[in-house]
Image (spheres, helix red, strand yellow):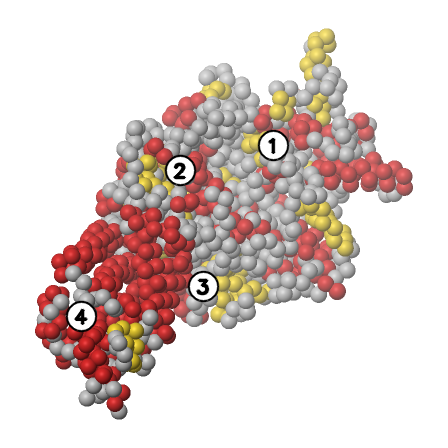
Amino acid sequence: MAFNFELPNPNTKDPKTNLGEADLVRRSASSVPAPARQLTPVAKLIDVSKCIGCKACQSACLEWNDMREPVGINRGVYDNPEDLTPNMFTLMRFTEWVNPETKNLEWLIRKDGCMHCADPGCLKACPAPGAIVQYSNGIVDFVHENCIGCGYCVKGCPFNIPRISQADHKAYKCTLCSDRVAVGQGPACAKACPTHAIVFGTKDEMKKHAEGRIKDLKSRGYQNAGLYDPPGVGGTHVMYVLHHADKPEIYANLAKDPRISPIVELWKGMTKYAGLAAMGAFAVIGLVHHVVTGANRVSPEDEENAKKLTGGRA
Amino acid sequence: MTAYDVESGDNVHPGNPVTVDRYTPGARVNHWITAISLVLLALSGLALFTPALFFLTGLFGGGQWTRTIHPWIGVVLFFSFAGMFLRFWKANLWKSEDGTWMARLRDVLTGHEEKLPEVGKYNAGQKVVFWAMSILIIILITSGFVIWDQYFAQYSTIDQKRVAILIHALAAVAIICVWIVHVYAAIWVRGTIGAMTRGQVTGGWAWRHHRKWLRELVGGKSH
Amino acid sequence: MTNSWTDIKNTDLVVIMGGNAAEAQPCGFKWVTEAKANRGAKLIVVDPRFTRSASVADMYAPIRQGTDIAFLLGVIKYCIDNDKVQWQYTKAFTNASYIIKEGFGYQDGLFTGYDEAKRDYNRSTWEYEIGPDGFVVADDTLQHPRCVWNLLKKHIAIYTPETVERICGTPKEKFLKVAQMISECSSPTKTMTSMYALGWTQHSKGSQNIRCMAMLQLILGNIGVRGGGMNALRGHSNIQGLTDIGLMSNLIPGYLTLPTEREPTFDVYMSTRGFKPLRPGQMSYWQNYKKFFVSFLKAMYGPAATAENGFAYDYLPKLDVPAYDVLRAFELMHAGKMNGYFCQGFNPLLSFPNRKKLTAALSKLKWLVTMDPLETETSRFWENHGEFNDVDPSKIQTEVFQLPTTCFAEDEGSLTNSGRWLQWHWAGGTPPGESKLDSWIMAQLYLRLKALYQKEGGKVPEPIVNLDWRYKDPGEPSAQELAKELNGSVLEDVLDPNDPTKVVLAKGKQVVSFAVLRDDGKTACGCWIYSGCYNEAGNNMARRDNSDPDDTGAFSKWAFSWPVSRRILYNRASADINGKPWDPTRKLLEWNGTAWTGYDVPDIAPGAKPDVVGPFIMNPEGTARLFTRGMMRDGPFPAHYEPFEAPIANVIAPKIRGNPVARVFKGDMEQFGDAKEFPYAATSYRLTEHFHFWTKHVQINASLQPEFFVEISEQLAKEKNIRSGGWVRVWSKRGSVKAKAVVTKRITPLICDGKTVHIVGIPLHWGFTGAAKKGFGPNSLTPYVGDANIETPEYKAFLVDIEPIVGPVA
């Protein structure tokens, strides 16, 4: 086997960070200089067919990020909390699906969370300079000191991932454990996953590993097994192996052909430029008009006429 | 002739020059609250609208404050404008002469007011501004609520929010343009600003720009 | 486990039945994933519910809880009928050919010798025919009508696919598909592993459930081979250690048995433990029993144990009943015959059946001591928590002492996992507050008791005052010292009988393994099977070398595996009668003409000739038992019995309720419900988000599965007008609980004997202490009856009724 699943343990002696400002390829509402080096693109591969829904990833995520989710209630399902929250960056979504071909029940369990799009809608929508950044290894990260809590990223995201905290009014989502990756480790969820349903490595390695998994699934009768790496967002740095890749929507509404919403594109594109142009135009026209026609002044005759009008009465 | 567009508080004071009370102190306060709100909204909104203007958040104490305060100013504007609407809507109803006035917009812009029909307290341009503001503010407050995530996130879907934010942006651009027209007109037509500062205009101003209104005021006095 | 977690990667077929490894052992389950991903192994799950394990299975078949024996006997019949038997293995390594005594029989659900009044059998006919040479008579041609093979065939003849469907509710075509997949593993080059847990043990015939699969594995030739075996999945990280170390009331360490009152002297005790070989040339390893027993007594009583006093045999308690299991203990409490209770690392108020009875029993105690890292419900049984613990503290006079202890991560020691691996661990944190090591608490108690006995005398003070307590700090024996004691040491020099100048065993040294233990008192050993864990080579449990030559999955240099670091029990059976591996690609051991060689420590004498000595050396036969003689109380073959509370009558023997020899205390029989009153078949289980009643104290786990619920099918929900996420009341003859309803496609009604059987799933994990929402445990509902052999309570099959309710006011 070419790929080693075992992620390194923390380097406690010399935790040199290898991911910084200089590795940014995109920075929200601002520009960055082209990075001097190109990091190897990384990816997390989530093999839904291996996932047992144990929620170890959720637990590890809360632990590593030192977040705590309040104790909720049971709502008749296994999904807990019921949705992603500003504390819970990843969530097992459970779907009971009866395969119409085999008539067999399939319990589809998908680990939801940020997909780390190559073309991130959140970053595109973000108005705050440097609140969302993209590294050359593909990680899309939120920089909380720059976040203003406007929620534009929520609208920009094609996967409905970011959540705004009501406590500090900042946006939160999976960081792909950029802090761990920076020191040569993998994400906490991948480290915790007991069945290696979550694996982490370079994007090429992950794609290759996925090929083997898809072959295995096809041999077990899943003819439509495949990799979910949607081109509509330029590919993602979190990918899924699905047994039914032709129907991603059965996995708790995983977007079939995700792309940044055209409305968002219009808003952050045309509207911005056309709007500024329109406002500028109005101001300029006013100015030009004033120069050309001069002020519209009341003449002495006007005053006289007014006096006449009132005086006539007086 | 009914004094259809004379508003309460409007009054004529003979003298030299003749002075005309155009806006009561209440109306002026109301206007300036609205005006300040609109300017603050424009500034804070533009800061979030385009990265080039993000620096404007500095005026509000940073991005977080800008995001927090903007919708609240919007609420203030809405209620403030509502007050103005109640004061002014009647005088802004469309009249037959307004059509003629609009048709001769060229003469308006070139200052040939003698070629225009006599108009009441508001000319057609002012009425357009008034109604445009009214409609845009309703659009802005409605779409604003949809994207005011701090309190109303759960009442709409993300798709609805996306549409709302686009509408909000477009409406904001429109209202800023209308505002530019409004402000420019006030500057261009000298003697106008006094109406909203001191509350008065000269008789000549009224004769020149709102002769019908002046006649009504004078005529009204005779009754 | 006969094998180990890591060995599961070697399998071709995983059968999860009577367990839910993905849910309850997710970390170990990774080896199933490995086998699937790298070997193309298939996974079968047979369970009343479509479980998390089923979610990644290749084949799922539903089964009604408590009918596993019918299913498995059906599979055995399928294999025999279709000639899917590993014949060489079955003939050579099992007792298939042995002749059973005349007079043995089975009729109407009962074997010969049943005494209804005693609820017990006279098992004298369940025995081999012994020839004039003193050995068992065998017919290698399997023609004799009374040979085990033919008796087995006769016994299982009724378990046709149709009968299986009628009893189990498993659709015939699904059963046949499972049977066919399993039968393929009769090939010597294909192996199947059985992974089971409490889904098999927690029945009134739990032991027979497991035996039944063991029989199937034997005829498929899957015991002792890589990727095969009977693999019990342990729930607690150290529950294997619990049984190994003799914490069962009728055991002493290393599966030696506590004497009964019919065995007043050492010699009488030893007279029934000779274990003479039953076949020529066999090894019968238990012939060493005396060495282990004497060494144990020396470890306990040191110099006070002498040859003259039978090595202090008198100090050992003598059982007057088969066992003082927990059910009996609470029965005694309930009857006012047990007045004090020491509850160490145990939460019986939620763990044992019929909570009402437990609360009544605890309320009758004079005192209760709890030792636990957590505030258990048991320690607070007297406290009113509204409907979650509806008691009146003013009416309870029990004095409760709560002694906070450290948890596993705060102390040093070893844990024994399912695969019999003793893995040393080190403290990872500092114990909070006043908590103390369990060993500190026990030592302090002991020293005070000893002082009292020394001062005041009293009845039988010797076992206390003479206990060998030579630790560096008597007030706190260290984990290292205790581990060394379990390993065993040499008490007196042992000289070579042929050359008295040579010291074979030097006084004061740790013994290398149990192979050198002696029955003359010159060695001490606390637990013979653990011997070798901490010898002169050091603490072998702390070994962390994860090299695995040739990827066999043995990891033989990792920690210590009992016995003698052997990774797969009965591994001699991985090779044929000539010592050649059945599957050369999965070689474990091989006979090289003079000795056994290979990847694992041979489970046989290294020089034992393959065609002479049988692989099952712990049996005097040298073979494995398809027919288990009189060793099990409820039959030499497994037979289908319904749970005590079953939705239908026993199809095979309609008059028999439950297991005919399971112990039922007076008054408990009346508390069994019937299907007329309680129409739904309930079962209890665990969820992966939680560990027993511990993790509900942890905020993260509590947030991931916050609230008590029950699971029902969409059909039952519709019938009863129950909404998913709404509140329901579930009640049995013994109690009632309120829960949220999870309506799911993962549970479907089964048709059993023509009747629609609805299943109600009731997870445990909630109580009235901790961070999670307050809730109930299934033990408010479950019946007070256990397995006929080892008294594990019947949690997995009982009857309830259910109705929608308006929820409690928040």
**Are the residues flagged by discs 1 and 4 in contact, CB closer than 8 Å?**
no
Q: In terms of depth relative to the viewer, which is nearer, A245 or C261?
A: A245
Label 3 and label 2 in one chain: no
Spatial distance from mark 3 to mark 2, Cα to Cα? Answer: 37 Å
Residue topped by disc 2:
A178
SS at mark 2 in the image: helix
Q: Which mark is residue A299?
A: 4
Residue A42 lies in quadrant: top left
Q: 10 Å neighbourhood of mark 4: few (<14), some, or many (≥20)?
A: few
Q: Position of residue A126 (x, y in %)?
A: 32, 49
Residue C328 left/right relative to C14: right
Residue for point 10% across, 71% down: B104
**Quick one: label 1, few (<14), some, or many (20+) residues within 10 Å?**
few
**Residue matched to label 3:** C725
Verify CB contact (< 8 Å) between mark 4 and mark 3: no
x then y, percent, for residue C567: 51, 29
